[in-house]
Amino acid sequence: MGGDEFSEIARLFRPLTGGAPGAFDLLDDAAVVSPRPGHDLVVTKDAIVEGVHFPVGEAPALVARKLLRVNLSDLAAKAAEPFGCFLAVAWPQAYGPAERAAFAEGLGDDLKAFGLALLGGDTVSTPGPFTASLTALGWVPEGRMVRRAGARVGDVVAVSGAIGDGTLGLAAVKGEIDDPDGRLASRYRLPTPRLELRAALRAQAHAAADVSDGLVADAGHIGEAGRVAIRLDLDALPLSPPARRWLDAQSDRAAALIRLATGGDDYEIVAAFADTPPPGFTAIGAVEAGEGTRVFCAGREMKIAQGGWRHL
């Protein structure tokens, strides 16, 4: 952005600091995060690329809001309370002043909604597709972060919210399925990080992960980290009304359930609990001795080639 970079940062992004003292009005090369007594600092980072994580031509405000929300989903799964973030964004030529302003406005709206401050970052230009990365910071009482590791044999595996809306939402955005009320597309474009579940996770969860790549894959990460096996019952999947209607219209129910459980972009939380899961979660399986993830439908074990999205 040439010589206008710093003036644009001041105009678009300085207001998003909310006056946080450690951000220094984005005039320095670094920020300061003061310790919070009795708490651990939780740090997570996710990146998004146009044409990979969102469709080409998506509204810049929606892109910014989804970028923040996918990071907050990681903090939610760790039972952390978000408070700040750092942004790095690479503007392609197609992102002119209006698009950059819309991106900043969308980000600002969600920063305010979720109670975060922008503490710093970087902006550059790129000949490639739009790319952005956000680092989110959160607090959790000392020693209480819920890790992927920790699941125990006999635990109940449960998931929050509804599964499958993300992958069906992408199909709706592409025009591949009907979405008359736009609910599926909205769930894909603007996932809701389950931050309200952090108290329940701190109190009861032995392990947790956010469902971004696909339920089967992300539940499997809990098994791998804890060196245990995961059993999932697809007939128990919690589904939204639009996903239930889609499922009922499919000729191969097992294949359709597998699609919902492996499609990704749900940004729910899958967790292991000692017994009955708390409100907000639905039991979908169990932790067993051994290794790997076993998936069942109508009492039959299903062979799944890929449990979710692979980045490489």
Image (tube, rainbow, N blue to C red):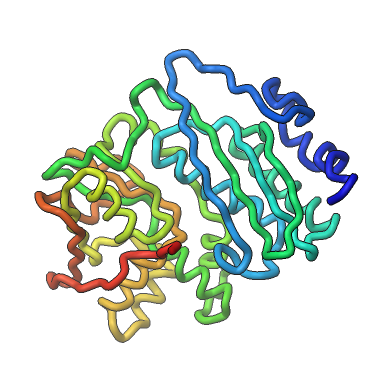
Q: Where's residue 139, x and y in %?
A: 48, 27
Establish if 298 lies above or below 237: below
Question: How many numbered circles does the render carry?
Answer: 0
Among the 4 quarters of the image, the one containing residue 230: bottom left
Along the line of sight, the residue nearer the viewer: 95 or 178: 95
Instruction: Check the image and name the residue furthest to the top.
Output: 37
Among the 4 quarters of the image, the one containing residue 7: top right
Q: Where's residue 16, x and y in %?
A: 73, 36
Q: Which residue does the image show at 25% across and 65% down from the upper left?
A: 234
Q: Which residue does the image show at 56% across and 52% down from the upper left?
A: 47
Q: Where's residue 182, x and y in %?
A: 57, 68
Establish if 51 lies above or below 137: below
Instruction: Check the image and name the residue furthest to the left.
Output: 289
Q: Where's residue 51, x and y in %?
A: 60, 69
Along the line of sight, the residue nearer the viewer: 192 or 102: 102
- Specify the quadrant that holds the C terminus: bottom left
Establish if 142 lies above or below 263: above
Among the 4 quarters of the image, the one containing residue 154: top left
Q: Which residue does the image show at 25% across and 43% down from the upper left?
A: 277
Q: Which residue does the image show at 51% across and 17% down from the upper left?
A: 36
Instruction: Check the image and name the residue furthest to the right.
Output: 3
